[in-house]
Amino acid sequence: MRRKIVAGNWKMNLTFQQAKELALRLNTWVKTNKPVAEIIVAPTHLYLEQLNKDLANSHIIVASQNVSAMENGAYTGDVSAEQLLSIGTKMSIVGHSERRAYHHEQDKYIGKKITHLYEHGMSPILCVGEKLEDRDSGRHFDVVEEQITVALERQNVDDLKNLIVAYEPVWAIGTGKTASPDQAQEMHAFIRKTIGGQHGISVANSTSILYGGSVNAGNARDLFEQYDIDGALVGGASLKLDDFTTIISARK
Ligand code: PGA
């Protein structure tokens, strides 16, 4: 079954007090409104432990924004899957385009992160997406196919059940430009087909593919009407309770 998911990537935003307040207000809203979509929030590592406690027994999953590709050891500043799990975090975003751009993360390395998560019984949200020059040169399908193929090639098929992938065209992230619903649907269908070809139809049919890139309260509904769009990974608009809850409500 494809899960309907709306995830908020808070990136390097919000003080601890602001993050806690937003999480608690979101939780109150969820309890009252009982949305259809599963909700995920990804605060900075620093706040994970407290938000895991604040949102225990809620319908909100608290995820990490990143995880190390290494098991443990002398990797200053990194956080391992095992460490995340030890404070109750069971999910992590991997391969976000900002990690790829500013930390030079590559597909094979991202695949190692996914393997570590699975080894600890955790799960990834794998981000993929092309740059503007890839789309302009017509290479966008090739780029996304390569990202998916390499990151997932060493994973165990059983682990891939309930995989979450986020398609985030780099040119749409934080720019106010969104892929049109048709462009997004075309790529989501391609991603599902690629996963099906490599890992089997049952993995493809249980993969939730989220769209990300300037999703907001005004455009979410049209995106969610597309057959292969299961939800959204939201950056900027997830920092404002009203906008984020409008997006969550749009996922029927
Ligand atoms: P945005 O970010 O919604 O601010 O474009 C999305 C993301 O990077 O996950």
Image (cartoon, helix red, strand yellow):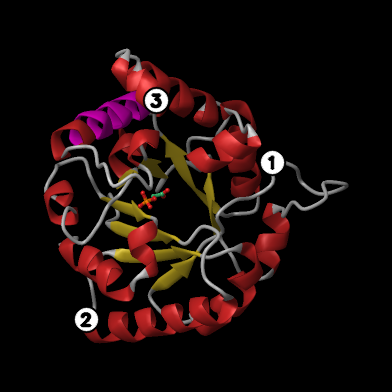
Structural distance between the alpha carbons of marks 1 and 3: 21 Å
Indicate the amino acid at tag 3. Answer: Val
Q: Nearer the viewer, residue 137 or 36?
A: 137
Q: Splitting the image into 4 quarters, where does residue 220 fall?
A: bottom left
Mark 2 touches mark 3? (CB < 8 Å): no
Q: Return the disc, 2 or 1, that comes first in the chain's sequence.
A: 2
Q: Residues within 10 Å of mark 1 (few under 14, many from 20)?
A: many
Residue 46 picture location, percent across and down:
66, 68
Label 2, secondary structure: give it.
helix
* 87 on left or right of 73: left
Mark 2 touches mark 1? (CB < 8 Å): no
Which label belongs to residue 144?
3
Residue 163 picture location, percent across and down:
42, 45
Question: For the residue with label 2, is its CB less than 8 Å from the closest atom of ligand 1?
Answer: no
* 71 on left or right of 36: right
Region rendered in magenta: 185-197
The residue at which mark 1 appears reads as 69
Indicate the amino acid at tag 2. Answer: Asn
The C terminus - image quarter: bottom left
Residue at image position (74%, 51%) is 78
Indicate the amino acid at tag 1. Answer: Ala
Structural distance between the alpha carbons of marks 2 and 1: 38 Å
Q: Splitting the image into 4 quarters, where does residue 240 fall?
A: bottom left
* Image: 61 above or below 80: below
The residue at which mark 2 appears reads as 33
Q: Splitting the image into 4 quarters, where does residue 25 fall?
A: bottom left
Q: Return the disc, 2 or 3, that comes first in the chain's sequence.
A: 2
Residue at image position (61%, 27%) is 108
Residue 110 picture location, percent across and down:
59, 35
Residue 47 picture location, percent across and down:
61, 72
Q: Residues within 10 Å of mark 2 (few under 14, many from 20)?
A: few
Q: Return the disc, 1 or 3, that comes first in the chain's sequence.
A: 1
